[in-house]
Amino acid sequence: MARTAEEKTQDYKAAGDSVTLINTLAAKSSLTDEEKETIKRNTDHLELMVAKSDWESSQTMTAFNKAITDGKAKL
């Protein structure tokens, strides 16, 4: 079933929250195991979101892809 515009907006916002969390944790010099797991969960979430093909043209994936790369580098 296709996502509605409202669902896409909600998913985009949730993905943005993941970006913020990953960026915050990736900026730390060292991470606890729990923080690493948080990064892993959020990068996994972003990968699922980036894989969706029905985004609106204004909903870019640049920050999502960067957060995935930066997050994985910290694991």
Image: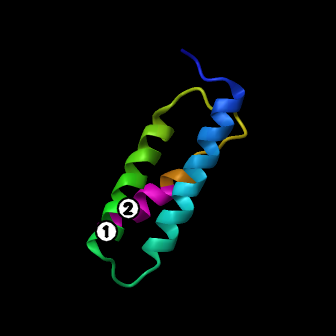
The residue that mark 1 highlights is 34
Residue 49 percent coordinates (x, y): 49, 39
How far apart in space, not on screen, are marks 1 and 2 (Cα)?
A: 6 Å
Residue 72 inside the magenta-drawn segment:
yes
The residue that mark 2 highlights is 38
Residue 46 percent coordinates (x, y): 46, 47
How would you rate the neighbour count of disc 1 (Cα within 10 Å): few for under 14, some for 14-19, many for 20 or more?
few
Residue 41 percent coordinates (x, y): 37, 53
Q: Which residues, given as a range, are shown in magenta?
A: 66-75
Q: Which mark is residue 2?
A: none
Q: Which amino acid does label 1 sit on?
A: Glu
Quarter of the view holding residue 42: bottom left
Q: How many dots with numbers? A: 2
Q: Which amino acid does label 2 sit on?
A: Thr
Q: Which colour scheme is used?
A: rainbow
Q: Which residue is drawn at 54% across and 58% down?
A: 19
Viewport quadrant of the C terminus: bottom left
**Image side of residue 41 versus residue 3, left or right:** left
Query: Do the CB atoms of the residues marked 1 and 2 lie less than 8 Å apart?
Result: yes
